Image (cartoon, rainbow, N blue to C red):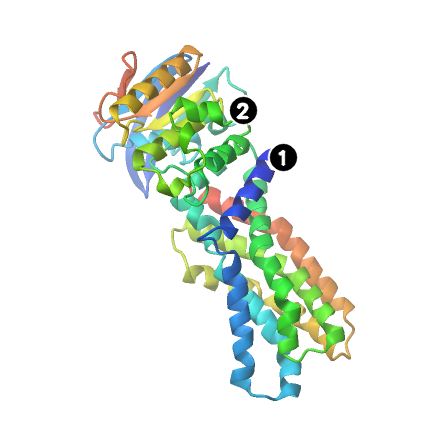
Amino acid sequence: MELRAEELTCSRGGREVFRAVSFKVSAGEAILVTGRNGAGKSSLLRMIAGLARIAGGRLTLDGGAPEMPIGEQAHYLGHQDAMKPSLTVGENLGFWTKFLGARSAVEPALEAVDLAPLAGLPAAYLSAGQRRRLSIARLVAVSRPIWLLDEPTSALDVPSQKRLSELMRSHLGGGGIIVAAAHGAIGLERARELKLGSA
Amino acid sequence: MSALTALLVRDMWLAVRVGGGALMGALFFLIVVTMMPFAIGPDLALLARIGPAILWLGALLASLLALDRLFATDYEDGSLDLLMMGGMPLEITVATKAIAHWLTTGLPLVVIAPLLGLMLNVELHALGWLTLTLAAGTPALTFIGLIGAALSVALRRGGLLLAVLVLPLTVPVLIFGVAAANAAIVGPAPFGPPFTILCALSLASLVLGPIAAAAALRHGLE
């Protein structure tokens, strides 16, 4: 499996954010997108997820399911956690697991992010870091080959960051692809760096 | 299919739990209709004549009230992004949300309509017909409103824009809804023609609403 971007151009609100960005990521590889604020890191991830318009260039995925858009083979972990405050932790994760088309149980994924004891608690009472972990549990519960992570370590404490990097390593070990946007290290030593806005 | 069931159940839960808008519409409907006799005065004949129009206007405004929550909350917390990345066609996802919305906000209006009809001196034998027109017509209000809700999210303008966009489109529903209800209550025109047109409006909006709403949401991507 290989995700390939050729000469991607992104424009937002009529302003060009970046142009001619090309990269390749193969199965088991991670790429770390860096750049100053407004360089288009999040926009790049959203373009791959199919949530932002591709103004120019091409985005292809070799070896995936050809009939499915890339967005349906990818997980997007954005700044917002997509969790409803009035539903419990378990209900929130259970909904996304079912909606995103997996039949797996919710408990193992909650265990993986250490939220299992809070499964019955309404999500409104979670801290920012706990909500982040709940979003990460979604990546574990539903298996999709591409992970698009927008500053995945924000709001996470040190043990949770460690757990996240273990999850990312096992995802890569299973032939997954990670494209992460961050300002600092996210705990992946082998990740290549793609610097936006340097040209 | 289980994805859609999950979405339907989630949206209905969200509507009925604390902070959801399920009963807000029904309550607003109740208040509007209760206030009418106070404003108009105790003229029973007049009330009976304008009763269907009051009920339909109340239902229209009440269903508009909860519409802006249809996509706005999902947009704000990022759920909309994930809904668009699901395996289902966006049109179907959007239609499912609209069905959940109708079940939690439209159906309560239909259920309390007979009670409110009594307060407006609608004759007993006509209450059933009046309720039937609301049951047939409120899905059209929801599915037409769906387009406005999607557009207001896509354009990042809430509230008033939605009302301005949606209300003109609901005029045919209002006309034929009230016409059918009047035909059932006072006659002499037959009930059938306006009622079948009302059903046709509902069915057409059932198909066109989700397509237009999905197109609006896709266009709103940036």
Expressed as whole percent of the image width and height from the top left, the position of residue A192 reads 29, 15
Residue at screen point 49% across, 58% down: B66
Q: Would residue B184 be visible to someone looking at this image? A: no
Q: What amino acid type is highlighted by mark number 1?
A: Met
Please tell me whether residue B7 is drawn above or below residue B134 in the rendered image: above
Q: Would residue A40 be visible to someone looking at this image? A: yes
Q: What chain does mark 1 sit on?
A: B
For disc 1, the marked residue is B1
Residue A89 vs residue B204, the one in the foreground = A89
Comparing labels 1 and 2, the label whose residue is closer to the camera: 2
Expressed as whole percent of the image width and height from the top left, the position of residue A190 reads 29, 11
| CB-based contact (under 8 Å), mark 1 and mark 2 | no
Residue at screen point 62% across, 60% down: B138
Secondary structure at badge 1 equals loop
Q: With B89 as the anchor, is A118 left or right in this view?
A: left
Secondary structure at badge 2 equals loop
Q: Quadrant where the N terminus of chain B lies?
A: top right
Residue A28 vs residue A193, the one in the foreground = A28
For disc 2, the marked residue is A104
Expressed as whole percent of the image width and height from the top left, the position of residue A184 reads 22, 23
* Circles 1 and 2 on the same subunit: no
Distance from the alpha carbon under mark 1 to that under mark 2:
16 Å
Q: With B51 as the anchor, is A8 left or right in this view?
A: left
Please tell me whether residue B89 is drawn above or below residue B28 in the rendered image: above
Q: What amino acid type is highlighted by mark number 2?
A: Ser
Question: Residue B112's quadrant in the figure?
Answer: bottom right
Q: Which circle marks residue A187 in the picture?
A: none
Question: Residue B75's quadrant in the figure?
Answer: top left
Q: Quadrant where the C terminus of chain B lies?
A: top left
Q: What chain does mark 2 sit on?
A: A
Residue B16 vs residue A168, the one in the foreground = B16
